[in-house]
Amino acid sequence: MDWMLMPLRRYAEFSGRSRRKEYWMFALLNVLIALFVGLVTLVMAVSVSSESAMMVVVTPVLILWFLLSLVFIIPGLAVTIRRLHDIDKSGWTILLALIPLVGPIVLLVFYCTEGTPGPNRFGPDPKAGELGNPVTA
């Protein structure tokens, strides 16, 4: 759970490096929240009989989901940029997502790639000092 919440503690920190575990656990947290909100919305929509009552019941849930999305966009962007820094790529590499089809696939490969061992131009290795991972100077 600590890995899921780490990007929220480093809310708007765009410098430094983030390892794969931090990035993917935050992505998992986003998926779990989206599934929960979707399930709550579906249950509430099915439980009402008329269309106007459904809008009254579902609208607050959708507003909550929208507000959560706004809260999570900055830490999501920050952890993504730090993840790119870990593989020694500029944060501007995230703009590859604008290239249809190919860009997101390339970024997915980058997100899954192991980080640069030892320090790089963006900071020290986030895995440095862990058991079984020697610190390289």
Image (cartoon, rainbow, N blue to C red):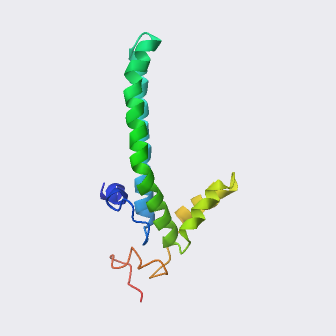
Q: Please state which of residues 11 and 136 is positioned toward the viewer in this rendering.
A: 11
Residue at 31%, 59% in the rendered image = 9
Rendered position, 72 above or below 78: above
Note whether residue 133 is visible: yes
Quarter of the image where one finds residue 5: bottom left
Horizontal arrangement in the rendering, residue 93 relative to residue 130 (left or right):
right
Residue at 52%, 67% in the rendered image = 84
Note whether residue 36 is visible: no
Q: Quadrant of the N terminus?
A: bottom left
Rendered position, 42 above or below 26: above
Quarter of the image where one finds residue 96: bottom right
- Image coords of residue 86 (percent x, y): 48, 72
Q: Quadrant of the C terminus?
A: bottom left
Quarter of the image where one finds residue 55: top left
Horizontal arrangement in the rendering, residue 137 relative to residue 111 (left or right):
left
Horizontal arrangement in the rendering, residue 58 relative to residue 90 (left or right):
left
- Image coords of residue 2 (percent x, y): 30, 58
- Image coords of residue 77 (percent x, y): 47, 57
Rendered position, 20 above or below 54: below
- The residue sitting at the bottom extreme is 137
- Number of marks in the rendered image: 0
- The residue sitting at the top extreme is 50
Residue at 45%, 82% in the rendered image = 119
- Image coords of residue 128 (percent x, y): 37, 78
Q: Please state which of residues 97 and 102 is positioned toward the viewer in this rendering.
A: 97
